[in-house]
Structures are given as structure tokens and as C-alpha cells.
Amino acid sequence: MKPVSPIPGKAPPTFAHGVHPPENKEATERLPIEPMPFVDEYVLPLSQHIGAPSVATVEVGQDVARGEPIARPGGFVSVALHAPVSGRVIAIEPRLHPTGRMTPAIVIRRDPWSSQRFPDIEPVDPKTLDRADVLKRIQDAGMVGLGGAAFPSHVKLSVPEDKPIRHVVVNGCECEPYLTCDHRLMAEHPGDVVRGAAMLGDLLGAEQLWVGVESNKPDAVEALRALNHPRVEVVSLQVKYPQGAEKMLLVAIFGKEVPTGGLPLDLGVLVNNVGTTAAIAALFDRGIPLVERVVTVTGSGVRRPRNLSVAIGTPVRALLDYCGLEEDAPRIVLGGPMMGAPQKSLDVPVLKGTSGLLCLRDAPALIEQPCIRCGRCVQACPMFLNPARLVRLVRAERAEEAEAIHLMNCFECASCSFVCPSRIPLVQWIRVGKSTARAAKKRAQ
């Protein structure tokens, strides 16, 4: 499989359909990553990833060190959880989760006298370990996809023998408006990105490694290419949303579509987020588990936008106290404006999958109008679906019929909602339909 060659004088490669929302990255795209000061209390939900929740292994009153395991995986599709700071466990109880539910969480009070430094650990070359040991270390380090879905990394890397991986693609597109955490990571720490990609390539026996970056990040492209790694090809892609969706990324790089109901594995490709790739390098090179991540705090309601290295479990309120929240910022979103989750409270923690904190004070109330059959949602959908028709079926409680016309192929990028002149919350209704269809299948089983 060869990459799509750009035509001289033409735009960089991309996919069909999609949208071009305002980027709004100028507030933070040139700001270096800085550490978020430690706070007094951290809340660590046991559900921070797809799959079974982690299982607490500590007790109330127990002292813990930064990076120490505090919860074990709750099954194969699950990962461990670690203390983001040295301190004392003061509670294991339900706390408010960014999903809006109360879920079990471990609460740690920071030791104000601790230096909060990681112990010096000898680097480990994963090539000296067998495959099972590498995957176990990744699971025990709490590694998940940092692009937002938080899928356990060891599960993704447990590739069936009948689906050999020929290409590893590192996703550095970051097409979501406002967010710049991946951009800054590539520009400031390209060595970790490339080193992590090489580790994944060795683990999977891949022939070629790729890093896909949108062309609005020229400094990141330059920093990655300057390393001149013989196995890593950096591809500059057209700026378009949702270029960062893995299926769209593969169309742009290789001109190949993932089969309906299939995965990139069916094309011999594994796609990994740039943040996760760098975190895997940090694990083996410096012994650091996943206890912190880069978060972009931005939006018209933020006085001092920043790219922050944040300890997992830090309260959202603490980030906004540090960056400054305008009083008239009514909308708070974890993630970006297209796929992020609006929040009803500031008393929720930063999770492993939290890429951004967006605060908007100029967000108008959207009043839904009847569908005018304009077809813009069809023209925008990168999966060539008919969102308006899907929503009509879902609203009529005919989710099975919607599933028959590929409801489940939607990956909820919200391009349809963005272009809808009637302000119909199409993607929210599609989510309802998918949940209804899954529930019906479970009842049938």
C-alpha cells in the first residue's frame, strides 16, 4: 500500500466531504506547554476508559507516592490507575464524573511537603522483552488513547495473528477547532513521538511508520522531519474536519477506505494518537506511567489561554482559577466544540481522555427549526450517510430501520450538526438511535 502522492500546485491530500469550521487556534498554537501547579485534592474516577472500570487497591488513610498504582485493571479491556501526586487517600466514594453521572472515585490529598518528583528508573528497551510482557507493562501503566475515546492501548495493540500490521500511522492531525495540545507536543517533544512510533513498529513488525499532520502545523512537521528517522515518514495533510478521524486519515494517506463494519486492521494498518505514542516512549525510556497529560485551556471565556501539563484528577475549577474564567462564560466544554462534552459543573476532574477545556461566552442559544430538506448534512458527512433521514427514523422510534441504512457507521463527528441551517441536533439524535439499537440487541440476546 503506497501513500497518495500530492499533485504539484494542488492542495495536500485529504478525504471527500467534511467541513471547514473556524480553527480558532491562534490563542494557544504558539504557547509552549507549561506545568499546571499542584492543587490540594485530586479525584480519580475508576472509569476513565472504554471497558471495565479499574478496581481500587488502596484504602482510606493510606499514603501513596506519585506514580504508585492505586487501582488494578478490572478485566482485559481495562487498565490500571496511578497516583498523580504523593499524598494520602482520604476517600473512596462516588464523585461527579464528566459524563454527568456519579461514579466511584479515589480521592487523594496532596502532601504539601513532597517534592512530587518521579524516582529515577533505568530505561527499558522493549525489543529486549517478549510481546506479552510489553503489552502487560502498557496495561499496568494505565495507557489509553489520548485522542478522546480512551480505548485501552494494550487491547488495540493485541493484533490477531491473521491480521498482520504493515503500517503504523501516528495521528497528529488535531483537526478539532481550538485544541493545540497535540500540536505543541509534536513541536516541543518530537523525539518522544518518533521514539514511541518506532517502539510500536518494532512491537507489531510494521514495515513503515507514518505521522499524519495537518498543514496548519508547519513547525510540528519541521520538528518531526528534522529528526530524519529512517523508518518514519511525516505526511502533511489538508486542513479539513474531521481529518483526524482514523478512517478519514487512511483515505487521505493511502487512498484506501476501511470496509463497512471493519477496522484499520483490515487494511494492515494500526492508528495511534500522537499523545499516546509519546506516553509509551516516556513509559519505557523514563518509567513514567500515565499520570498527566497536556490540556489546552482556551476560548473566549478564558482570560489567559494556555497549554498545560496537567495531573490526572485535577479539578476543572482549579484549571479555570489558574487561567482565569470570565464571569459571562455560560458554556464549559471538555474537549473541542465539535465532539466535546458540555459540563453542568466545574467540580469534575480532568480525565485521561481530556484533551481540552473550552469556555465560551459568545455561544448563542440554538433554537431548532423544521428540516428544510436542503441536503447539506449529506454533503458534509464524511461517511456518505444521510443524517436527516437517520434522525427522522430515530425520532419515529424506528432505530432498527436506521441501523439498516448504516446508522452504526456514524462516528459522531458532528459535521452534519455544524452545517444544518435548521439547527437540528442531528448528532445527538444519532447517538440516541445507536443507544436504542444496542439496547434492543442486548434484550434480544
Image: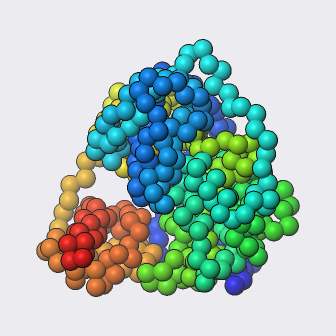
In this view, 278 is above or below 409:
above
Q: Is residue 186 visible?
A: no
Chosen colour scheme: rainbow
User: Would you say 309 lies left or right of 336 here?
Assistant: right
Looking at the rendering, which quadrant does residue 394 occupy? bottom left
Q: Residue at x 69, y 84 (%)?
A: 1
User: Would you say 163 lies left or right of 59 here?
Assistant: right
* Of residues 65 and 360, the one drawn nearer to the viewer in this rendering: 65
Looking at the rendering, which quadrant does residue 359 occupy? top left
* Of residues 384 and 83, the one drawn nearer to the viewer in this rendering: 83
In this view, 86 is above or below 222:
above
Residue 63 image point, x, y percent: 52, 24
In this view, 122 is above or below 43:
below
- How many marks do you count on the picture? 0
Q: Residue at x 69, y 65 (%)?
A: 131
* Of residues 19 and 59, the one drawn nearer to the viewer in this rendering: 59
Residue 409 image point, x, y percent: 39, 76
Residue 247 image point, x, y percent: 53, 74
Q: Residue at x 47, y 39 (%)?
A: 57
Looking at this view, name the residue that lies furthest to the left. 396
Looking at the rendering, which quadrant does residue 215 occupy? bottom right
User: Would you say 255 lies left or right of 127 here?
Assistant: left
Considering the image in quadrants, where does the C terminus appear? bottom left
Residue 135 image point, x, y percent: 63, 60
Q: Residue at x 65, y 37 (%)?
A: 33
Q: Is residue 253 visible?
A: yes
